[in-house]
Amino acid sequence: MRESTRADLPPLRFTFVIGRYGAEILGGGEKHARDVAERLAGRGHDVRVLTTCATSYATWSNDLRIGRSTLSGVEIVRAPVLIGRLRPFDDVTKWLASQLRGVRALGRLWAVAQGPTVPSLLDRLPAEAASRDLLVFFSLLSGLTFNGLARVGQKSALVPLVHEEPPIYTRIARETLARPAALLVNTEEEWRRIARVTGGAAAPGAVVAVGREEPAPVDPAFAPPTRRPYLLILGRAGKTRPMISVWRALQARTDLPPIELAGGRRAAWSEVELVTVGEPSAMYARLPNVTQLEFVDDRTRWQLVRGATALVNPSRYESLSLVLLEAWSCGLPVVVNRRCDVTVGQCRRSGGGIAIDFDDPARGAIALAEGLASLDKRAAMGAGGDAYTRARYDWDRVLDAYEATARATRDGAPMREAIARWAPEAAGDE
């Protein structure tokens, strides 16, 4: 990857706006933002992040210190949250806004209820837009995005992280998708969803996503959490909940095909472990053959991925799924939810995994066991995923897109022409 911008071109000035940011923040969108910001800084650009003092999206409480800091070449400016998440009012207003989609006031009420409300950050945005080349907002469904984009308009880009859920059809969401100069989306499926939501009235789009991360090498000294073969789940407990019933069904049945292992060995499902990484859950604690590791460092995560039989992402709500890309970069097959069009599309294009029905645990258990039984089939899926990430997820391509967007907003150039190279209709992956 190119480590600095060309010497004959001046550095660009980027400001990222996101609710949570930092080394202590775990989450797909947050990691996405940090990876892009740090790599832009590595190219020699001036990169700043405006964020809150919160570490938890569930409360938006002020856990971190107000003020400035620097992380991996990126300036971080933290502002205090005035109003955090208002439970249970946020769920009530979310439901109302989703039912009465055309009522703008309900959408705005929901935006306040879910938070975060950060007046000092929002007040800073007009001056920031005047002095910077591009403001990049992360996540459509955020009070910062709804209110912030309205203040900066065409000096901005939005990484919407849109998946299929009722609030994206609200009036406030549709209007917000039209405000920035560009939408930097993750997949073709996400772009089609945005086009459907907005009736084609969205801002110009580009399929950008992220670049491939090279996995850490195998560490011979690493001690896995179990001596058994294991399936791996990475992520928040709420997103992984569909696996609970499927795992219970897998463990209860004795007629499922065993998993073929190296050396001609086979393992019945009663000998297979499920390893979860992330938020612990009492629901998993009640299941047999489950190990919960909570949060781990990058080194441990890579070794866990390398040692797994397969990675499972049972979530229905994804705009990309970074954990799939990590698994595939290690040559690991994946299991996804057939009701998530994004991850199903990723598996279809790559050949890197199987999609099962998590809503029908009995059928899902059979499909999972049959899909992962063959050692050769798992190896072929892992190789397909690896080749797919190498061909598609290139950091130079990603960073070039951010630079092209920033130059267009800086120079007042036509955005569609500036980002035509990344236009969804030219992706050619369908």
Image (tube, grey):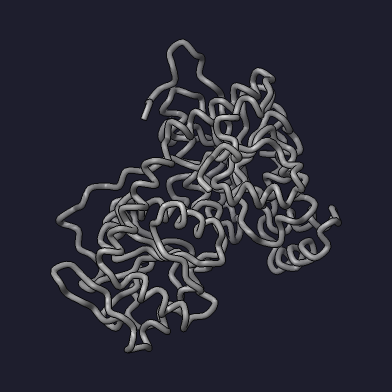
Where is residue 312 drawn, in percent x and y? 41, 65
- Against 100, residue 389 (above or below) is above
- Against 26, residue 250 (above or below) is below
Q: Quadrant of residue 121?
A: top right
Where is residue 413 drawn, in percent x and y? 67, 20
Where is residue 354 drawn, in percent x and y? 42, 65
User: Which is more toward the observer, 74 or 344?
Assistant: 344
Identity of the residue drawn at 36% across and 76% down: 369
Count of numbered tags = 0
User: Which is more toward the observer, 239 or 122?
Assistant: 239
- Against 355, residue 49 (above or below) is above
- Against 10, residue 270 (above or below) is below
Identity of the residue drawn at 46% across and 56% down: 348
Q: Quadrant of residue 373?
A: bottom left
Q: Is residue 17 visible?
A: no
Identity of the residue drawn at 50% across and 58% down: 343
233 displayed left or right of 53? left
Q: Quadrant of residue 79?
A: top right
26 displayed left or right of 121? left
Where is residue 178 drawn, in percent x and y? 74, 40
Can you say which quadrant of the picture contains the N terminus? top left
326 displayed left or right of 19? left
328 displayed left or right of 34? left
Q: Is residue 169 visible?
A: yes
User: Which is more toward the observer, 204 or 367?
Assistant: 367
Identity of the residue drawn at 66% across and 56% down: 84
